Amino acid sequence: MRVLLASTSPARLMLLRQAGIEPETAAPDVDEEAVIAAVEHAEARTLSPDEHVLLLARRKAAAVAATLDPGFEGLVIGGDSMFELGGEILGKPYTPEAATARWHDMRGRTGTLHSGHCVVRLSPGAAPGEAHAVAAASVTFADDVTDAEIDAYVATGEPLLVAGAFTVDSLGGAFITRVEGDPSTVVGMSLSTLRRLVAELGVSWPDLWNRS
């Protein structure tokens, strides 16, 4: 069965590969800020972190699914993540200055990584099926991370384009002392959650294994 990852995230691609799945990939044409703004305006409220990541995961999967040939048979996986610290939502910092300030604030504290998942099953001649869910994991940062270590980490560029300005599976992992929850959630997607969603759509997880 074909698996198409509706994301260009290297971390999500790596996760699936490590789980025995070599997916196709496609970049979803979704203006994330516009989507959130439109829904919040229509509903006159601010979306919770779980609602935020689930909405974007579903929109990404749907956007890619809509571009596929009618003969496509398989799964489309969409995902989105955001980090919450002290009630504040922290997205990608983008600039070294923002990443540095973020790390000064995060050290010694615990935050929550929210990850939205959406799986769409497509079969020729059949209505699409969809399953979705949110997973969360808490992350605790070392309290003895020095300013020099923060500067060196930021200088690598790694934290600039990831939710929360950190990774757990690369250079940032040395500055994290504890993860509670499915560790893969912090990387970008919860594999255990994906397995459950795939099963809801009538697919056995081992049937997706296509890497030698």
Image (cartoon, helix red, strand yellow):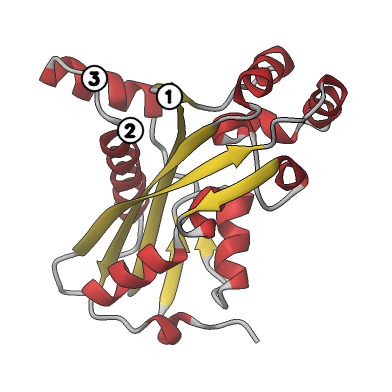
Among the 4 quarters of the image, the one containing residue 199? bottom left
Q: Position of residue 161 (x, y in %)?
A: 63, 32
Instruction: Say if mark 1 contacts mark 2, CB within 8 Å.
Output: yes
Residue 41 numbered tag? none
Q: Which residue is drawn at 14% across and 67% down?
A: 127
Q: Which amino acid does label 1 sit on?
A: Ile
Q: Which of marks 3 and 1 is nearer the N terminus?
A: 3
In the visual, does 133 lie left or right of 88?
left
SS type, badge 2: helix
In the visual, does 145 lie left or right of 179?
right
In the visual, does 109 lie left or right of 60?
right
SS type, badge 3: loop
- Does residue 123 show up? no
Measured along the vertical axis of the image, is residue 35 above or below residue 75?
above
Q: Residue at x 83, y 22 (%)?
A: 151
Q: Which residue is disc 2 drawn over?
A: 49
Q: Which residue is disc 1 drawn over?
A: 89
Q: Measure the C-alpha gap from mark 2 to mark 3.
A: 9 Å
Image quarter hosting the C terminus: bottom right
Q: Which amino acid does label 2 sit on?
A: Pro
- Does residue 146 show up? yes
Q: Which residue is disc 3 drawn over?
A: 46
Q: How crowded is mark 3: few (under 14 residues within 10 Å), some or many (20 or more)?
A: few
SS type, badge 1: strand
Measured along the vertical axis of the image, is residue 32 above or below residue 119?
above
Q: Where is residue 150 in the image (x, y as percent from the top left)?
A: 79, 25
Q: Residue at x 35, y 73 (%)?
A: 74
Q: Which of marks 1 and 2 is nearer the N terminus?
A: 2
Q: What residue type is labelled 3?
A: Thr
